[in-house]
Amino acid sequence: MHLNPYGEYAVVLAGSLVNDWPEDREGIVSRAREVGMTVDFPEEPRDHERVRRFLDRWLTVVDATEPQHRARLLNALMAEASAYPRLTDHHDEGWHLHYRDDDASSLPDVLAAVISVGTALHLTTRGMHRLARCAAGIEDEADPCTAVVVDVTRNGRQRYCSVRCANRAAVRRHRARAGSPGGA
């Protein structure tokens, strides 16, 4: 048996979805498959809309800067979405834990459970600071980047969503130093 390592892939999936929202349900399922989710999702009306509503609530966790507040918000999401852990061996993947009821198989319900628990595992194993918005948009109000950064780096110092944003911020800092008294 192995513990289902929801942490990294689930929070990366959530970040991917909010940073580049798919136009339809099939796009959400495709992203879930890309990160290795094999569970079948019976189609239900409003799946696309319900996943988006959940992710909008998940973004309040991303935007919470105080660890206690972040934990309260995430605990509320897990309480709504999760059930007690249970053993499963679906698709002959080997025994592992699921954090949802067996009958909670709709796309929004599964993603809410997986992403909520995964975010909690990510933050508790890697650090409460390792989920945020891109620093480019935070450091400069004129920068339009609001992307979510899921820090899975070894050193835990990822602040930008992309090399492009990091470079843009570095250029701004350089210009600010060069333009200031005593600057280069």
Image (spheres, rainbow, N blue to C red):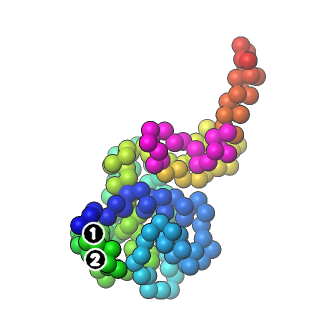
Q: Give the residue at x 67% y 45%.
A: 164
Residue where numbered disc 1 is placed:
96
Residue 143 magenta: no
The C terminus: image quadrant: top right
- Main SS of the magenta part reads loop
Q: Please tell me which of labels 2 and 1 falls first in the chain.
A: 2
Relative to 1, is 179 on the left or the right? right
Disc 1 residue type (three-letter): His
Check the image and report above or below for 2 versus 69: below
Q: How far apart are marks 2 and 1 (CA)?
A: 7 Å
| Image quadrant in which you'd find residue 39 | bottom left
Residue 168 picture location, percent across and down: 69, 40
**Foreground residue among 93 and 81:** 93
> Which amino acid is tagged 2?
Asp
Q: In this view, does 2 lie above or below 107?
A: above
Residue 89: give its label: 2
The spot of residue 136 in percent (x, y) is: 62, 42
Left or right side of 151 for 5? left
Q: Residues within 10 Å of mark 1 (few under 14, many from 20)?
A: some
Asked if the stretch drawn in magenta spans residue 157, the answer is yes
Q: Label 2 crowding class (10 Å Cα cut-off): few <14, some 14-19, many 20+?
A: few
Q: What stretch is highlighted in magenta?
A: 151-167
| Residue 63, disc | none
Q: In percent of the image, x 70 and y 23: which residue is there?
A: 177
Q: Are marks 2 and 1 in contact (CB under 8 Å)?
A: yes
Residue 160 image position (x, y, % from top left): 58, 44
- Which of these two is toward me, 169 or 45? 169
The N terminus: image quadrant: bottom left
Of residues 96 and 51, the one nearer the viewer is 96
Farthest residue to the top: give it.
182
The residue shown at (52%, 42%) is 158
Please state if 122 lies on the left or on the right of 135 as rendered: left
